[in-house]
Image (cartoon, rainbow, N blue to C red):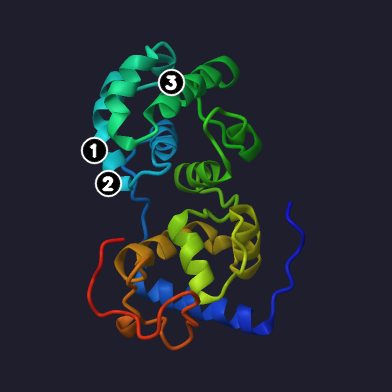
Amino acid sequence: MPPKSRLSPKTKQTAAQTLGALIALYPNPECALVHRNAYELLVATILSAQCTDARVNMVTPELFARYSKPAELAKAEIEDVEEIIRSTGFFHAKAKNLVAMANRLVEFHRGEVPEDLEALTDLPGVGRKTAHVVLGNAFNVASGVVVDTHVKRLAFRIGLTKATDPQIIEHELAALVPQAEWINFSHRLIEHGRNVCFARKPLCDTCTLNEFCPRNGVAAGGSKKKAAD
């Protein structure tokens, strides 16, 4: 684990204000990846690397129609999987990881997705972020805070971290937010990043976090015009 962070009273106050504001804004957050079970969520999350959730959701219906279970995906030809997932980017590596992951599930976990962080991260193509997504959304296990590009950007802008390493950011956010909120905190930050706190032109002037957000790395004034993230 990363070394313990020294959290200032100001950072703790900002975290509490952020959590309260996001709960009010997004009372019922949900995972954006469409799935029916832990296996489908695991596959979708692997595909979401360097790809939008919307694009993944366009690809997975065909993928799951052909390979509805790990045992079926384990027997798939990598070239066939590549053709289905091509539009998600990095499809050679993703297809190889998906088939290898399915084989590992069949061989070591009886075709079931394990409810364990270490077992999940031992699967091909699965890092801490993917494991946290699966554990939190498929099993309701708050194993950690998911740190994707939105969470990383917003955590810095709001002043919750100065780190750039995702694992350190995860560790710091976990120390700032109650464990019971870890799963939904990530969902809410992601939703806010998609709707308001855009990468290039965040809508600072109309953001409800504006009163306490230091806008780290944001040009003065923000923007009232919506921009593509």
Question: Picture quarter containing residue 192?
Answer: bottom left
**Residue corresponding to mark 1:** 58
The furthest residue to the right: 3
Give the foreground label among 3 and 1.
Answer: 1
On screen, residue 137 versus residue 203, left or right, reads right
The spot of residue 198 in percent (x, y) is 34, 67
Q: The residue tagged with tag 3: helix, strand or loop?
A: helix
Q: Name the residue: 67% across, 83% down.
A: 9
- Give the CA separation, mark 1 to mark 2: 7 Å
Task: Say whether residue 110 is visible.
Answer: no
**Residue corresponding to mark 2:** 54
The spot of residue 123 in percent (x, y) is 57, 28
Question: Picture quarter containing residue 67?
Answer: top left
Q: The residue tagged with tag 1: helix, strand or loop?
A: helix
Q: Name the residue: 48% across, 74% down.
A: 217
**Residue corresponding to mark 3:** 70
- Give the CA separation, mark 3 to mark 1: 20 Å
Q: Tell me the kind of residue under disc 2.
A: Ala
The first of marks 3 and 1 along the sequence is: 1
Quarter containing the C terminus = bottom left
The first of marks 2 and 3 along the sequence is: 2
